[in-house]
Image (spheres, grey):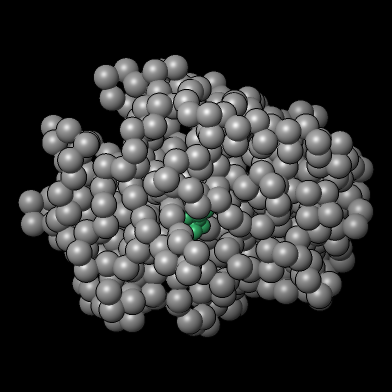
Amino acid sequence: MTEREQELIRLAEEEVEKNKKVVESDPYRLRFHLMPPVGLLNDPNGFIQWNGTYHLFYQWMPFKTGHGAKYWGHYSSADLVSWKHEPVALAPSEWFEVNGCYSGSAIEHDGNMVLFYTGNVKDEAGNRETYQCMAVSENGVTFDKKGPVVELPEGYTAHFRDPKVWKKGSEWYMVVGAQSEDLTGKVALLRSADFKEWQHLGAIAGSGMNGLGDFGYMWECPDLFKLDGVDVLIASPQGLESDGMKYQNVYQAGYFIGNLDYENATFEHGDFVELDRGFEFYAPQTTLDEKGRRLMVGWMGVPEQDEDKHPTIAHKWIHALTLPRELKWVDGKLLQVPVEELAKMRQENLVELSDVQLSEDKVGLAMEEGGTFEMNFSFGRDLSSFDLNLGEAAQLTYDASSSVFSLHRKSFVTGEWETRSCKLGAMTELRAFLDTSSIEVFLNGGEEVFTARVFPDVSVAGEVRVSGSGTVEKVQAWEL
Ligand code: FRU
C-alpha cells in the first residue's frame, strides 16, 4: 500500500470517529439496511460470495454528504443478515483514480478475490479520463492495486465506467457502461483470456440499437447474467423522458431479457422494464452465490434527485443499500424475492389474522410503538380495493377496477404527498419491510417492487390501518 493510500484511509477513519455520535444519534438511522458510517454512500460494488462469506462493497464519500472522489467501503456477512463493517477496501490514491475509485465488480480467481473498478480522473479544466483497473486480495480485506487493465476504446467519450466481469467457458467477459461519441448511452462488451489483456468486442446494447430508438445519453452500471434460461442485461440509463407511470425518477434502473451471442457480440432483446417502481432505486448489482442463487442489491437513492434535501444530512450521512433480493425468471416474469435469510430478522409476531373482511372503515392493526416491521398480506380473489395506511410514512393503495397499485409518501422536500404507481394484474400478495426511514414493498411474489425512503415525524407502528373491499386471507406482521 502506498503512503498516499495509507494517509487517505487514515483521514477517512478519522472522519468516521469524529462524527460517530452525530451520525448514530439520528433517529432515521436504519436498523437493518447497510449505510455509510459517515458521509455519502451510493452504488453497491463488488458483490460476491467468496470462500463462503458474502462481501458487499459500496461507493463511499467519507468527507461530505455529496459526491466526489469515491472510496470503496466494505461489509461482509455469513448470512446476508448480520453484516460486519470491514476496513476501507480502496482509496483514490493513485494517478489513475485520483478523482475516485468508481463502481465495479468482484470475481474469484485462483483462490483470490479480484476487483475491477473504474479509475476516474479529471483535470483542472474538467476533462475526464477513465481507466478500468484491477485490484487483488488474498485475504478478502486488503487489496493490492494492479492499475489499469483497460484503456478507453475508440468510439466512446470518457463516460465509460462500471465494469462487471464474469467467466464463460475459459474466457472472461466484461460489460462497461458507456456513452458513444454521438453522445448516446451504450453497453460495451469486452473479452479476455487472462483478464489482464482485454479486447473490445463492440457495443451490444444502447440507445438506437436493437430497435430501441432514443434511449438516453449515458448508461451506467451494466450487469449481464444468465437466469433460468434467458440472458438478462441490467443497466441504469440516464436521459429517459417520463412516460405515463414509467420513468418517474430522475434516472432509471431496469433490465432487458434477451440472448447474448458471445461469438458475434450481439444481444437481441425485448423491452426495457424498470426493476423498481418506487422513488429511490438505482445502480443495482447482482452476484451468483454458492447456492446458485442470483442475488441483487441496489442503491436506495437516485443521483441528483433531491439528494441535498435528505433529512439525514443534518446527521452527516446519506443513503443506504436495499435489502438483498433473489432474482427468478418464472413464466416470462422477472421476480424479485427478499432473500429467505431475512426471516431470521423476525422477532415478536405482532399480528396474525385470517379471513379478514375489509370494509370502508379503517381497522387498526396493533403494532408495537416504535417498531420496525415486516408485514405479509395474502388476498382473496374478491379483492376489489385495498388501502394500507402507514401513518405519516406511507400509504399503499390498490384498485382492482383500474388495476393500479400506488405507493404514496410525504415528500421530504415539500411535505406534500407524492405518488408512484404501476399496473398490476390481480393483487394476490403484498409484503412490506418498514425500517425507521425506508420502505420496500414486494407485490405478487416480487412481480413488482417499490422502494422508497420515508421520513415520518413519529414512528408509524401505532398507526397502521387497513380498509378496502374484499378478503384478506391472511395477514402476518413481525417486529424486526
Ligand atoms: C452511478 C455512478 C457510476 C459511477 C459511480 C460514482 O451512480 O455514477 O456510474 O461509477 O456512481 O460514484
Counting every numbered tag in the picture gives 0
- Name which residue lies at 22% across and 54% down: 189
Question: Does residue 476 appear in this view?
Answer: no
Residue 277 against residue 112 in the figure, above or below = below
Q: Nearer the viewer, residue 340 or 22?
A: 22
- Name which residue lies at 34% across and 38% down: 147
- Name which residue lies at 39% across and 32% down: 145
Q: Quadrant of residue 128?
A: bottom left
Q: Nearer the viewer, residue 42 or 231?
A: 42
Is residue 54 found left or right of 20 in the rendered image? left
Residue 328 against residue 85 in the figure, above or below = below
Q: x%, y% of residue 138? A: 39, 18
Is residue 142 found left or right of 196 in the rendered image? right
- Position of the C terminus, as image quadrant, is top right
Q: Quadrant of residue 266?
A: bottom left
Question: Does residue 414 appear in this view?
Answer: yes
Is residue 170 found left or right of 19 in the rendered image? left
Q: Nearer the viewer, residue 392 or 127?
A: 127
- Name which residue lies at 17% across and 54% down: 200
Residue 443 against residue 20 in the figure, above or below = below
Q: Nearer the viewer, residue 230 or 103?
A: 103
Q: x%, y% of residue 456? A: 85, 58
Q: x%, y% of residue 16? A: 74, 35
